[in-house]
Amino acid sequence: MLDPAVAGSRSLPDLVKTALTTGVRIFQLRMKTPHTGEFYDLAAQLCALVRAGGGTFLVNDRADVAQAVGADGVHLGQEDLPLADARAILGPDKLLGISTHTMNQALEADAGGADYTGFRPIFPTTTKAHPAPVVGIAGLREVRAKVRLPIVGIGGITSKNVKEVVAAGADCCAVISAVLSAPDPQAALTELIKAIR
């Protein structure tokens, strides 16, 4: 996940290029306090870079910005647009994901037309100011047993625990701080990918 607030002075376009060369193929832009114009400009720039590198680009929260920049889809939070309304904006061919924190939310996402769910937080996280309660590996296993959707594990994931998250049923994992706050993002990505294999 790409978040300028976490990246600090690091260039997100440079981080995207690094991630693409390391093998990352799915990117999500997360900006929690942007002006629409600023969000649009960065999303358009990153979408073009990701597409040129053969990746998939998602926009966090904003279906309108995702549609405007030609992103591959949008990732919604529980307080964002309803799934059906986001689908109406994006059309049937774009990816539509939603963050879930409980079994009921995950089941609703499954029944409501989401293409995947980001189930979180698996572990304690410092990225969100007010995170939901930790669901843990046991919570992930329970959701995996009942939800047909692909599950993206999110929250506190590092190279030390990523294998456990995948073993518990996550189809893939999203990371922010483990890479964007690392002294060497490329080394952090390489370590994460190696830990999964």
Image (cartoon, rainbow, N blue to C red):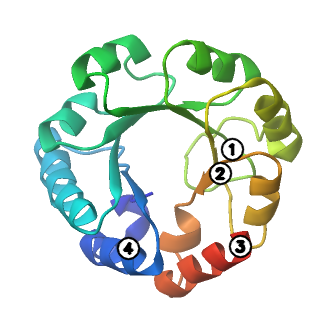
SS state under label 4 = helix
> Which residue appears at 49% of the width and 30% of the height?
115
- Looking at the rendered image, the disc whose residue lies closer to the viewer, 4 or 3, is 3
- Cα separation, mark 1 vs mark 2, equals 4 Å
Q: Amino acid at mark 3?
A: Arg
Res. 11 in view: yes
Q: Amino acid at mark 4?
A: Leu
Give x and y (percent) for residue 27. 39, 56
Few, some or many C-alpha atoms within 10 Å of disc 2 (few <14, some 14-19, many ≥20)? Answer: many
Q: Say which quadrant the N terminus sits in.
A: bottom left
- Cα separation, mark 4 vs mark 1, equals 25 Å
Q: Which residue is mark 3?
A: 197
- Looking at the rendered image, the disc whose residue lies closer to the viewer, 3 or 2, is 3
Mark nearer the N terminus (4 vs 1): 4
Give x and y (percent) for residue 171. 65, 48
> Which residue appears at 57% of the width and 82% of the height?
190
- Cα separation, mark 3 vs mark 2, equals 20 Å
Q: Which residue is mark 1?
A: 121
Q: Is residue 53 above or below residue 18?
A: above
**Residue 20's disc number:** 4
Q: Say which quadrant the C terminus sits in.
A: bottom right
